[in-house]
Image (cartoon, grey):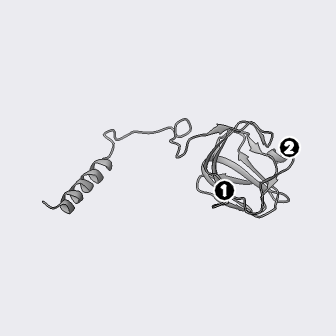
Amino acid sequence: MSSKNLLAIVLIGMLIFSCKPSEEKNETVDLTTQHELIFPKGEKITNNNFIGDVWVHMQVRADSVNQNSVGTVTFDPGARSNWHSHPNGQIIMALDGEGYYQEKGSAKKMLHKGDVVKCPANLPHWHGASADKEFIQIAITSRVDGPTKWLEPVTEKEYLK
């Protein structure tokens, strides 16, 4: 038997066994208390740029070769960033939970798994979790024209509006 045929048989076998349906027909999973994370939760943020408990796991740190940073941010219910802006904008990709995003002068938007937001350059905005659900996002930020500019905290009135 040739090595190509052997490889094909092994791959087909792996595919068959990895796609085997569950033995239990009525198996359910409570997604509100148990879910698999794609990336680690990361380190708890301890600076004054956030309200509530927030964690970040950096997948990519900006450097001289690639000036984009990519991080997964996990917000506990009610947690959020301060108002801030990015010289080159930002992209937010919702991975799980329920979150908010708001640009200065606009209404707050609800974010759910699969939503993507393109934050315009130099436009103050904030993002975070809803009042009663965790929110997990990926933040992609260019550092070409400088770092994030952090502004004032989001007030309770602004958050609840």
Q: What element carries label 1?
A: loop
Q: Is residue 57 left or right of residue 10?
A: right
Q: Is residue 49 left or right of residue 9?
A: right
Q: How far across and how far down the image is residue 43, in percent?
A: 64, 38
Amino acid type, label 1: Asp
Question: Reading the chain from its start, which is encountered first: label 1 or label 2?
Answer: 1
Number of dots carrying numbers: 2
The answer to whether residue 92 of the structure is visible from this angle is no
| Residue, disc 1 | 63
Q: State the residue lying farthest toward the front.
A: 64
Q: Residue 161 carries which label?
A: none
User: How many other residues sit within 10 Å of disc 2, few (<14), some (14-19) or many (≥20)?
Assistant: few
| Residue, disc 2 | 155
Q: Is residue 93 left or right of residue 50?
A: left
Q: Give the residue displayed 34% in from the left and 41% down from the top.
A: 25
Circle nearer the viewer, 1 or 2:
1
Name which quarter of the figure residue 66 lies in: bottom right
Asked if 90 appears above or below 154 in the picture, the reply is below
Amino acid type, label 2: Thr
Q: What element carries label 2?
A: loop
Q: Give the residue displayed 72% in from the left and 59% down from the top.
A: 143
The one nearer the camera, 74 or 22, is 74
Mark 1–mark 2 Cα distance, whole angstroms, equals 34 Å
The answer to whether residue 29 of the structure is visible from this angle is yes
The one nearer the camera, 151 or 145, is 145
User: How many other residues sit within 10 Å of disc 1, few (<14), some (14-19) or many (≥20)?
Assistant: few
Q: Give the residue displayed 71% in from the left and 38% down from the top.
A: 45
Q: Give the residue displayed 71% in from the left and 44% down from the top.
A: 130
Q: How far across and how far down the image is residue 124, in percent?
A: 82, 57
Q: How far across and how far down the image is residue 72, in percent?
A: 62, 48
Name which quarter of the figure residue 1 lies in: bottom left
Mark 1 and mark 2 residues within 8 Å of each other at the beta carbon: no
